[in-house]
Amino acid sequence: MNNTIQILIAMIIYMAAVIVIGVVYAKRANKNSEEYFLGGRSLGPWVTAMSAEASDMSGWLLMGLPGVAYWCGLADAFWTALGLAVGTYFNWLLVSKRLRRYSVRANNSITLPEFFSNRFREKKKHIMFIAAVFILIFFTVYAASCFVTCGKLFSTLFGTPYQLMLIVGAIFVLLYTILGGFLAESVSDFMQSLVMIIALSVVVILGIVNAGGIGAVVDNAKEIPGFLDFFGLATPTLGPDEQQIVSESGAPLFGDAANYGILSICSMMAWGLGYFGMPQVLLRFMAIRKENELKRSRRIAMVWVVISLAVAVFIGIIGRQLFPTEHLTKSAAENIFITMAQSYLPAILAGFVMAGILAATISSSDSYLLIAASSFSKNIFQGIFKKSATDKQVMIVSRITLLVLTAIGIVIALDEDSVIFEIVSFAWAGFGATFGPVMLFSLFWKRVNKPGAIAGMVSGAVMVFFWKLVLSNLGGVFAIYELLPAFIFSSIVIVAVSLLTKAPSDEIKEDFEAVRTGNNL
């Protein structure tokens, strides 16, 4: 039996297990919209923690982050990982408990747009509509990044056309999401988070052994200017075709190390701010069965995140020594994890490791599609256009929405040279700046009002687009990651508009105080 068939068999076994989970939970998921979209607020601490992190990290953890480290060294990957770890901790510490409590107080909200709408007791659903629209936009981009991962994975493994594999992966994700809903997605995410961390750990250990030990990896990395620096950046020497040039001796060429100052560090650390506005994580806070279990979930999540991020970065560093000329473009560099797994594992085990990438992709894309579909069907269709819609009608509309969003995501992902890290970074900034500031102010500032919330969401989203598409082209200070300036700008707008407009009603203030103190809930 050749290696390709063994890998395929292993992946089929894994996917069969995922489908079984979907079938098991399908009946319960289709009971009503609350079960389908939020699992009836029944998640335990382990499933809450692990599914939140698995749905968050996606194939970006297994392909995007190692690819960054492989391509330009430690700095970008390390400061991004550190920012994400810090952001994860403070999100669980500050937001989780109060959001769980507030979402119940706010008329038992089961989606993020619904929470914001109920939080401000709006009669005309302006916040709900705006929030739902932005979720549709940014999650479609996010889903596209997952489809890129599927396309790269299968085309690399089986030598098949990228576009065909992209479509196959997208269709599988679509069918699974339609079948099982939030609970099945969360339970399978728990399993997938285990597969992801095991896959990362196995590959990094084998990589160290084959590289001759950690000392040999470090010595090799030091030979590349800036590759192992916290305050420097390796710069691959590229030809006119954007491929890294290889010398006659067979070594890849690098230029002088680029400077990596405090602005660059702040830019990458700003990734951590995105967590405060990330719907797929925030929904897990709302879905846990008891708020006093969130402390345990936080500890579980932090252990998983720190280990996974550290190992993913190190895989890129090791890969540069083991396969220096294997991946000569920025896009191809994101395949280093696949290359190492195929090279050092028996085929059947490599198949299960490849399932780790598929696990990460599925765990994220089904979350993204489900949340986006709920935003349209629950918040726009039922919340605004047809308030008398039955649960059955909402479910039908959500499935139609899933189909449309999947098609759009496939179109966005068709470019074979797409870089997962870059697609994710834009969507991450969009969510972080659109929802992060308004979430924090909604939970911790009694004076914030509806005009301030709307102005903050719109200004944050617009600034992400404006900074990325216009200002970043100017270079210099404007080359900073768009999330940081957009997050700050949104926060300023929320405060200014809230103070310049009418204060919230007494009922809204009573809700806030009840949540803050934990009384009268």
Image (spheres, grey):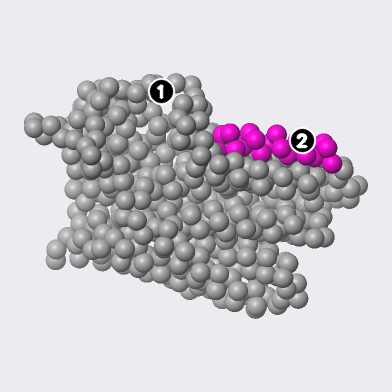
The answer to whether residue 109 is magenta is no
**In the rendered image, which residue does mark 1 sit on?**
260
- Residue situated furthest right in the rendering: 506
Name which quarter of the figure residue 89 lies in.
top right
The answer to whether residue 493 is magenta is yes
- The answer to whether any part of residue 271 appears in the image is no
Q: Amino acid at mark 1?
A: Tyr
Question: Viewed as shown, does residue 397 lie left or right of 174?
Answer: right
Mark 2 Cα-neighbour bin, 10 Å: few <14, some 14–19, many ≥20: some
Q: What kind of element bears circle 1?
A: loop
Location of residue 99 with respect to 229 vertically, above or below: below
- Name the residue at 21% across, 33% down: 321
Residue 161 in the image, given as x and y percentages of width and height:
25, 63
Label 1 vs label 2: CA separation? Answer: 34 Å
Question: Viewed as shown, does residue 165 lie left or right of 19?
Answer: left
Q: Amino acid at mark 2?
A: Ala
- Name the residue at 61% across, 54% down: 134
- Name the residue at 56% across, 34% down: 484
Q: Where does the N terminus fall, quadrant-wise?
A: bottom left
Query: Of helix, strand and loop, which mostly describes the magenta segment?
Result: helix
**In the rendered image, which residue does mark 2 sit on?**
496
Residue 390 in the image, given as x and y percentages of width and height:
70, 77
Residue 171 in the image, given as x and y percentages of width and height:
41, 69
- Name the residue at 52% across, 62% down: 369
Name which quarter of the figure residue 80 lies in.
top left
Which region shows up in magenta?
481-501
| Closer-to-camera residue (67/331) | 331
Q: What kind of element bears circle 2?
A: helix
**Comes first in the chain, label 1 or label 2:** 1
| Closer-to-camera residue (347/337) | 337
